[in-house]
Amino acid sequence: MARLIYTAIASLDGYVEDVDGGFDWAAPDEATHAFVNDTERSIGTYLYGRRLYETMVYWEAADSLPDREPVERDYTAIWQAADKVVFSRTLPAVRSARTRLEREFTPELVQTLKASAERDLSVGGAELGAVALRAGLVDEVHLFLQPVTVGGGKPALPGGTRLSLLAEQRIGRDTAYLRYAVRR
């Protein structure tokens, strides 16, 4: 069975967005972006909520933009090659290839996706990630900690999440990568 991985870029104090909904502080440097690309190569399907999908759909046409850095071209190819499932009651339609729209996130659907997948799945976004974590669906959590504190906002993990450290690595000058198994 494929793993379901929740990945987040977070502040040192555990937030993916600040109190104003901003996350410009989370932009990865080139070394971190390349490392993220390498961790994403195993992903065959991305599970998104509406808000994160609307941010990530940028990568659908990113290869047509001039002056893209090699690390960005690499991620564009990774993202475009994967399937996407968007969970939203309000999104009228998807705007990317290899993408389907589901109106409700159910544990049964995700279990079916995991059981039938040949490659790992990724759940993105703190809200959808929290739902998947609470439902016991997430197998691993990958955190990229940025050297900034934001003092509040949207937490990367829901309260009560219990994890066991599998790996840690410093990336570039300042980013810490932490890979955890979810303790059931």
Image (cartoon, helix red, strand yellow):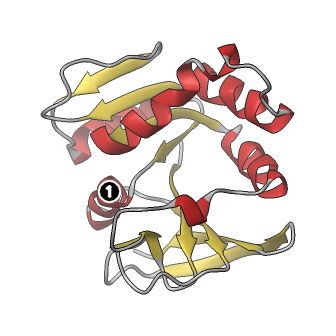
Q: In which quarter of the image is residue 162?
A: bottom left
Q: Residue at x 34, y 74 (%)?
A: 19
Q: In which quarter of the image is residue 93?
A: top left
Count numbered badges in the picture. 1
47 vs 32: above or below: above
Q: In this view, does 154 lie to the left or right of 147?
A: left
Q: Say if residue 56 shows up in the picture.
A: yes
Callout 1: few (<14), some (14-19), or many (20+) C-alpha neighbours within 10 Å?
Answer: many
- Across and down, in percent, residue 14 comes to 48, 80
- Across and down, in percent, residue 65 comes to 68, 19
Provide the secondary structure element on which disc 1 rests: helix
Q: In which quarter of the image is residue 95?
A: top left
120 vs 177: above or below: above
Q: Residue at x 32, y 19 (%)?
A: 94
Q: Which residue is drawn at 33% across and 75% down?
A: 158
Amino acid residing under circle 1: Ala
Q: Quadrant where the C terminus lies?
A: bottom left
Q: Is residue 5 left or right of residue 101?
A: right
159 vs 166: above or below: below
Depth check: 114 or 172 in front? 172
Q: Which residue is drawn at 53% across and 48% down?
A: 3
55 vs 61: above or below: below
- Across and down, in percent, residue 17 comes to 42, 66
- Across and down, in percent, residue 166 comes to 68, 73
Say which residue label 1 marks: 132
Q: Say if residue 1 shows up in the picture.
A: no
